[in-house]
Image (spheres, rainbow, N blue to C red):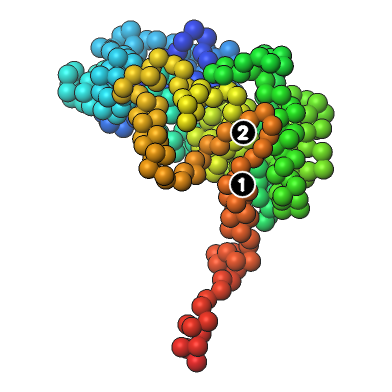
């Protein structure tokens, strides 16, 4: 008999959804590498009530606590991660070699923390998406949103976070500050410029924690849909944002997760980015991203080299300043998205595609 688990370690009364997902992603990766069973986060302890979404027991945290205390146990640390060259999978393999984890019959490996970010949990992306899709009300909400979207229009998601976010005054510094509200005027300008170029061909999706009446003005003259009428829409909103062709982000972990699950492009509020000179990043201000093994340090050197070599880059994340001037590259991208959404040229949807004249003449 074996009883081997990876336990997502709870911090206090639990954290926001995004923070918990980082730990769950690490637990899944470790479990896959060691042939353990990954437990879900202790949603029963979380003060934000996420157990209602995940349908988990109220006292699941007691089971987690008992496993770690009763079984032989160690915790994966950020130091392990750094020692493995900032590679989470390699850190688990190294721990296995040291502790023979994969040969244990009874063991509880615990993981915690946001260290490593999305870079550490990339292999868990589809697992986490699957877990979110299975939450209460999510599939029904996504169905209702899907039927509300015009079939061929470009989809632009807009995440407007207000609520408990702090509001900075004119002239304040936004650089490297999270949980701050972006000025509504910035959203309005960006949205207006996109709508002007794609009027009649673009539908905006609004995800917000503010009353919809408070922010409707930023969508003046635009076609939009919102989810304010849907039940338990926190997770379905995140996934709906991730399915848009372009997402206009807030400075929040919620927007980060929408971008992580998406394959589309996204716009980020440029004043929030850390200035590296010819480049900018979200986390470049952090000590852990300034050391030589960090993903940001590595990316900075690679991109700087490409720029010096004259290469033209088209990044997925696009910075837009206070003036709301959206780069032409984004408009070209949306034109491509619009072309690909046309159902009449989609073969699997009974569409047709042009073929070369030479081919037709050879047939005749």
Q: Which mark is residue 153?
A: none
Q: Is residue 167 above or below residue 326?
A: above
Q: How many marks?
A: 2
Position of 148 with respect to 214 (left or right) is: left
Query: Residue 78, located in which quarter of the rendered image?
Result: top left
Circle 2 residue: 320
Between 194 and 92, the one nearer to me in the picture: 194
Between 345 and 142, the one nearer to me in the picture: 345
Q: Position of residue 117 (x, y in %)?
A: 43, 24
The first of marks 2 and 1 along the sequence is: 2
Q: Residue at the location (58% across, 58% down)?
A: 340
The answer to whether the residues at label 2 and label 1 have Cβ atoms under 8 Å apart is no
* Label 1 Cα neighbours within 10 Å, binned few <14 / some 14-19 / many ≥20: few
Position of 6 with respect to 343 (left or right) is: left
Q: Residue at the location (70% across, 44% down)?
A: 194
Q: Residue at the location (82% across, 32% down)?
A: 217
Q: Is residue 61 above or below residue 137?
A: above
User: Quadrant of the image for the N terminus?
Assistant: top left
* Label 2 Cα neighbours within 10 Å, binned few <14 / some 14-19 / many ≥20: some
Helix, strand or loop at mark 1? helix
Circle 1 residue: 328
* Residue 127 shows in the view: no
Between 52 and 90, the one nearer to me in the picture: 90
Q: Residue at the location (54% across, 18% down)?
A: 176
Query: Residue 330, located in which quarter of the rendered image?
Result: top right
Q: Position of residue 301 (x, y in %)?
A: 36, 31
Q: Position of residue 22 (x, y in %)?
A: 45, 24
């Amino acid at each position: 008999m074996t009883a081997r688990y990876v336990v997502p370690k709870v911090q206090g009364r639990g954290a926001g959804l995004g923070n918990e997902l980082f730990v769950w992603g690490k637990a899944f990766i470790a479990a896959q590498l060691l042939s353990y069973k990954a437990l879900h986060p202790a949603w029963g302890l979380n003060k934000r009530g996420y157990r209602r979404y995940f349908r988990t027991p109220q006292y699941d945290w007691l089971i987690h606590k008992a496993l770690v205390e009763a079984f032989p146990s160690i915790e994966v640390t950020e130091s392990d991660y750094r020692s493995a060259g900032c590679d989470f999978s390699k850190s688990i393999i190294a721990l296995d070699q040291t502790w023979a984890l994969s040969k244990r019959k009874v063991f509880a490996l615990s993981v915690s923390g946001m260290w490593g970010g999305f870079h550490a949990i990339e292999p868990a992306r589809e697992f986490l998406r699957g877990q979110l899709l299975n939450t209460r009300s999510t599939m029904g909400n996504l169905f209702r949103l899907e039927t509300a979207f015009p079939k061929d229009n470009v989809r632009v998601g807009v995440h407007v976070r207000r609520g408990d976010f702090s509001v900075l005054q004119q002239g304040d510094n936004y650089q490297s500050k999270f949980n701050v509200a972006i000025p509504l005027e910035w959203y309005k300008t960006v949205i207006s410029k996109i709508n002007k170029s794609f009027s009649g061909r673009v539908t905006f999706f609004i995800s917000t924690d503010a009353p919809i009446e408070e922010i409707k003005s930023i969508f003046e003259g635009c076609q939009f849909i919102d989810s304010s009428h849907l039940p338990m829409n926190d997770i379905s909103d995140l996934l709906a944002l991730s399915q848009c062709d372009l997402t206009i982000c807030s400075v929040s972990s919620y927007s980060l997760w929408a971008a992580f699950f998406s394959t589309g492009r996204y716009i980020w509020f440029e004043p929030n980015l850390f200035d590296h000179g010819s480049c900018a990043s979200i986390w470049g201000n952090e000590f852990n991203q300034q050391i030589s093994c960090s993903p940001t340090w590595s990316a900075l050197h690679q991109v700087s080299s490409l720029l010096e070599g004259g290469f033209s880059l088209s990044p997925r994340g696009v910075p837009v300043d206070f003036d709301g001037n959206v780069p032409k590259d984004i408009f070209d991208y949306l034109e491509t998205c619009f072309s690909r959404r046309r159902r009449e040229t989609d073969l699997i949807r009974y569409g047709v595609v042009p073929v070369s004249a030479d081919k037709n003449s050879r047939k005749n």
